[in-house]
Structure formats: structure tokens, C-alpha cells
């Protein structure tokens, strides 16, 4: 199977869940990725006090991460969760929209491999995928 340039919307959403903006990096939407990264950093800077992350000064251990996460204010947690969810939705929507724009007009290319079709064949001569009768662009001649 050849690459048709389609993106996986769920993969973009999962990457955005890991860190807002990663889904947009996958989609190669660089400006949006930087905006999501900047939004997370600015929200964290504005809403999380330095005293909340003080346990991390002694080193990065599991106990220090747990202690720091318990010190994060509830409002900051809600804001970061909302940013993450919005980033996931945006990455999913962008991937879905990009796939819809990349789809070719039905009947001109194979829906499986994306290569050009012969109008008089009921299958793709490149990948041998059977085609529906609606895919052919020429109407049946009347007898």
C-alpha cells in the first residue's frame, strides 16, 4: 500500500494528550504547535507558584514529582486540563479536515491506493481492489 498522505486523527489526539502541541507537530502544523506549547508554559507560569514546585529542587524523583503535583492549585489543574482537551480536539479536527481536503474526487482515483483509474475497468489495475459501480465515471450505455 502506498502512502496517500492521510493522517491518523486519533494518533494526533493521543499525542496532544501526552503534551498539548505534539499532535500538531505530527500534523506538521508548526505555528499551531508553538501556540499550544506557549499556552501551556504561560498558563503554568501564571497559575502555579514557585513554592508548589519546590520539592523538585532536590532532584527528579517519584516522591518529588508526587509532592509537587499535590501542591498545584486546583484552578491551575483545571486550566491545564482544559488546554489539554482543547488541544486534543483541535488536533483531531485538523487531521480530519486535512484528510477530507486530500481526498480525491470519487471516480478519478482508487480509494485504496490513490492511483489513477481506468474508466472501463471494475477494479484498480494498480492494486486490484474491486470498485463499486458508482466509482466509474462513464455511465452505462443504454441498449
Image (spheres, rainbow, N blue to C red):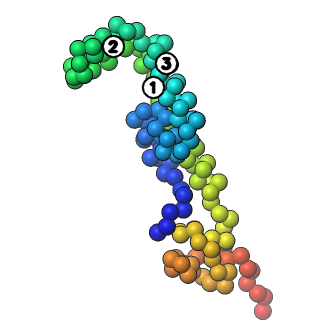
Compared to residue 129, the image places residue 94 above or below, namely above
Query: Where is residue 3 shown, x and y percent of the image?
Result: 50, 63
Q: Earlier in the sequence, mark 1 or mark 2?
A: 2
Quarter occupied by residue 49: top left
Q: Quadrant of the C terminus?
A: bottom right
Compared to residue 93, the image places residue 8 above or below, namely below
Q: Secondary structure at mark 2?
A: helix
Query: On the image, numbered disc 2 is attached to which residue?
Result: 53
Query: Where is residue 121 shown, x and y percent of the image?
Result: 62, 84
Give the mark count. 3
Query: On the image, numbered disc 3 is attached to which residue?
Result: 43
Measuring 50% from the left and 48% from the top, which residue is drawn there? 9
Disc 3 to disc 1, C-alpha distance: 11 Å
Query: On the image, numbered disc 1 is attached to which residue?
Result: 81
Nearer to us: label 1 or label 2: 2
Can residue 44 be seen from the camera position used here?
yes
Compared to residue 51, the image places residue 107 above or below, namely below
Q: Earlier in the sequence, mark 3 or mark 2?
A: 3
Compared to residue 45, the image places residue 7 above or below, namely below
Measuring 59% from the left and 72% from the top, which residue is drawn there? 115
Q: Residue furthest right?
A: 142
Contact (CB < 8 A) between labels 3 and 2?
no
Can residue 89 be seen from the camera position used here?
no
Q: Residues within 10 Å of mark 3 (few under 14, many from 20)?
A: some
Q: Secondary structure at mark 3?
A: helix
Contact (CB < 8 A) between labels 1 and 2?
no
Q: Earlier in the sequence, mark 3 or mark 1?
A: 3
Disc 3 to disc 2, C-alpha distance: 15 Å
Q: Secondary structure at mark 1?
A: helix
Disc 1 to disc 2, C-alpha distance: 18 Å
Amino acid at each position: 500500500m502506498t502512502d496517500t498522505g492521510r493522517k491518523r486523527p486519533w494518533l494526533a489526539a493521543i499525542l496532544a494528550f501526552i503534551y498539548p502541541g505534539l499532535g500538531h507537530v505530527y500534523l506538521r502544523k508548526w505555528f499551531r504547535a508553538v501556540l499550544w506549547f506557549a499556552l501551556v508554559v504561560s498558563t503554568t507560569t501564571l497559575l502555579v507558584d514557585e513554592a508548589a514546585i519546590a520539592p523538585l529542587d532536590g532532584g527528579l524523583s517519584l516522591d518529588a514529582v508526587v509532592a509537587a503535583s499535590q501542591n498545584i492549585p486546583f484552578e491551575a489543574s483545571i486550566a491545564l486540563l482544559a488546554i489539554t482537551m482543547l488541544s486534543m480536539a483541535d488536533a483531531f479536527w485538523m487531521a480530519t479536515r486535512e484528510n477530507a481536503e486530500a481526498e480525491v474526487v470519487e471516480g478519478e482515483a482508487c480509494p485504496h491506493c490513490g492511483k489513477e483509474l481506468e474508466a472501463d475497468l471494475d477494479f484498480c489495475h494498480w492494486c486490484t481492489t474491486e470498485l463499486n459501480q458508482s466509482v466509474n465515471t462513464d455511465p452505462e450505455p443504454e441498449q
